[in-house]
Image (spheres, helix red, strand yellow):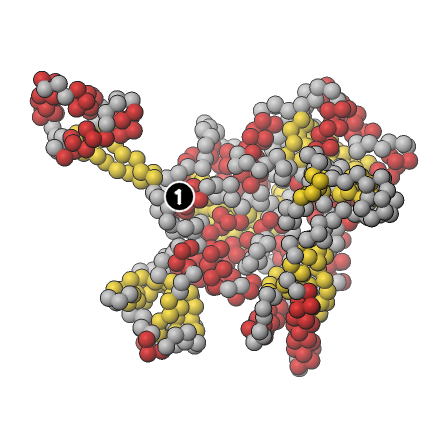
Amino acid sequence: MTGQYANIIVEISHEKVDRPFQYKIPQELMGRVEPGTMVVIPFGPGNKPINGYIMEVTDKAEYDIDKLKYILEIKNNGIDVEEKLIRLAWWMKREYGSTMITALKTVLPVKQQLKQLEKKKLTLAIGREEAEAFLKNCLQKKYAAQAKLVEQLLEVEELPQEIVTKKLQVSSAVISNLEKKGILKVITENVYRNPVHFKTEETVKKNLSLRQQEITDAILSDCRSNKTVTHLIHGITGSGKTEVYMEIIEQVIMDGKQAIVLIPEIALTYQTLLRFFRRFGDRVSVMNSKLSQGERYDQFEKAKNGKLDIMIGPRSALFTPFPNLGIIIIDEEHETSYKSETMPRYHAREVAEKLASYYGANVVLGSATPSLEAYYRAKKGDIKLYELNERLTGGMLPKVYVEDLREELKKGNRSIFSVHLQELIADRLKTGQQIMLFLNRRGYAGFISCRACGHVMKCPHCDVSLSEHKNGKLICHYCGYEQQNVKICPSCGSKYISGFKAGTQQIEDLLYKCFPGVKVLRMDADTTRNKDSYEEILSAFSNGQADVLVGTQMIVKGHDFPNVTLVGVLAADLSLSANDYRASERTFQLLTQAAGRAGRGILPGEVVIQTYQPEHYSILCAKDQDYKTFYEEEIIYRKMLHYPPAAGMLAVMISGIKEEAVIDLSKKLADKIIQRNANCENSKQKVILIGPTIATIGKINDIFRYLIYIKHMEYGILVQVKDDLENFTETLVLKNEMVQFDFNPMNTY
């Protein structure tokens, strides 16, 4: 990488990332330094040599050239963890479009200005005979506290200072006095905060099936080649993908390397961590947003210092600073939560592959319903594909019923539950088996509308409907705006205004009404606000403290409850109505994953899918857990309309506080793309332009949002377009407008 100047950060912490310092690159180092390179620089008035990391190489001098200092040398001690992470940040900046500062803050550990926890122990600093003589002297002089402490230290070699001060009632002053006299010494050790609060016994590892062993051996062979290879395990629900993961990890650890296991939701952490902790003990830790800042920092420090082998968590766990990473496993790789919703809008799957290339590590993707992106690459031969088609327990897949809600209404059933589902719930309650009811909604009711004029109660700031909650409030789930519920339509004055659709709370209430004495747990965004809510709810249900678990998407992803023999999917096709080209894929994945929660133990399972569109291919394929048929149907649609993965798509979001300025900037960017197409000599370089248009939600928190979509068969062309638009935007004088880029967006805006 060429350039005359280097912007350098001198400490790897959030406080220092905002303050890069610019240095000249000496002639002998030209072309040898790049983002991430560790260098020695003269720093401060005394020009003290310190280590720094290059975050950018440029030809633009930001200060007086005569005042800039030269880099002294490259630090040749091998590529360390920080260097890899800074190189990764640079790649993310280029690939996804963001500032280097933002990318660095994404990949670097949390702030380091935290007090390290310490543990102090006391031990004798003199021999036994001398200590006994000192004790005798203390007793004669009636130094009771000193005598008590020395007497205890003669009985045991070490005592925690906390026990000495609290249990023995010996003051810190006495301890300090004896330390000064040379009678005892205080040993101080750093202690790491531990986010893993449960204790469990080790379990005997399960014998792998022949197919599981074949997959494990194949992946381990590539792991030991020090080449970066990506693998996709397509295994039906309950087929034992996790057992394969754990066997691979065990062997990788034996080879002296570490593992990162990504999971899509915090809700999965408890069960996943429990299984890994039983197998690997305290060499496992967890990373998620529910941890305190101190806990997060300590987990990174433990990993960096070689005190951990496995880190489990959502996409942020990807940036764990392991010194010798060997494997990255992405479970439920199809989940949308692996895509960042803030800049840089990276996908964990893509970043994992880039990070793995720095270590010569392997990446394993796993899912019962792989993303079309992953399966498309596997079909092309870009990644290795493995199939697991049998349940680990040897049990059968659950029997699935599709209930047509249109027919239910014709029969006079206006309940949320179909007649068949009600019968099955009653049967399970009699036999003591458990039930999961899934609803992709939040709040007490979906929205409030007037039956007379059609008016919908909306947030005045975000242009979305307000959701009714049981406390009598109407709440916006984007900006948090609240207002009291209404009894009269503010538009026409009609009294026929009420909630529409059902929410998880309403399902819970209806269960109590229809099945007196039923024990229900509810798991949604409203019941999991506290740090330990997920663990408490899942543990209670696993221990049989409830008959029914009602919830939103988080209850159908990866959980394993052997006593669950019935899963009800309510209003299954709500997601089919979304204004999103991925709607069919999301529906298929969701229904297949939900159905997979039933019958995972010895008892057979049944699933009821309630829908208004029973003939849709995504629902029919989910009923049969037939991924391949679904893929063949869906990929035809994607190819026809140039949607990912058949083509690449770039979303350009233009936002600002003045709508006129946002519209004007949107048109300028669109004109720039039109001009680019006109100048393309090769027609294959031209892109498809959609927009600009107002976003699906045109205003959030008083910020107006407009969109441009750009499509092309080659991803690299879209990166070039992004670069062109970034450079063009830098030439404009913007006031409060912002331009953001999202490659292959997981959601329409």
At horizontal 37% and vertical 77% (from top left) the residue drawn is 64
- Residue 20: percent from left, percent from top: 40, 65
At horizontal 63% and vertical 63% (from top left) the residue drawn is 656
In this picture, residue 33 sits left or right of residue 214: left
At horizontal 51% and vertical 61% (from top left) the residue drawn is 92
Q: Label 1 crowding class (10 Å Cα cut-off): few <14, some 14-19, many 20+?
A: many
**Residue 624 appears in the rendering:** no
Q: In this view of the protein, which residue sits in the foreground, 631 or 36? A: 36
Q: Quadrant of residue 400?
A: top right
At horizontal 63% and vertical 34% (from top left) the residue drawn is 523
Residue 226 sits above or below residue 561 on the image? below
Callout count: 1
Residue 38 sits above or below residue 267 on the image? below
Quarter of the picture holding the N terminus: bottom left
- Residue 148: percent from left, percent from top: 19, 20
Residue type highlighted by circle 1:
Asp
Q: In this view of the protein, which residue sits in the foreground, 238 or 410? A: 410
Q: In this view of the protein, which residue sits in the foreground, 77 or 410? A: 410
- Residue 749: percent from left, percent from top: 68, 57
Q: Quadrant of residue 135?
A: top left
In this picture, residue 37 sits left or right of residue 103: left
Circle 1 sits in a helix, a strand or a loop, which is it? helix
* Residue assigned mark 1: 298
Residue 239 sits above or below residue 230 on the image? above
- Residue 653: percent from left, percent from top: 64, 63
**Residue 316 appears in the rendering:** yes
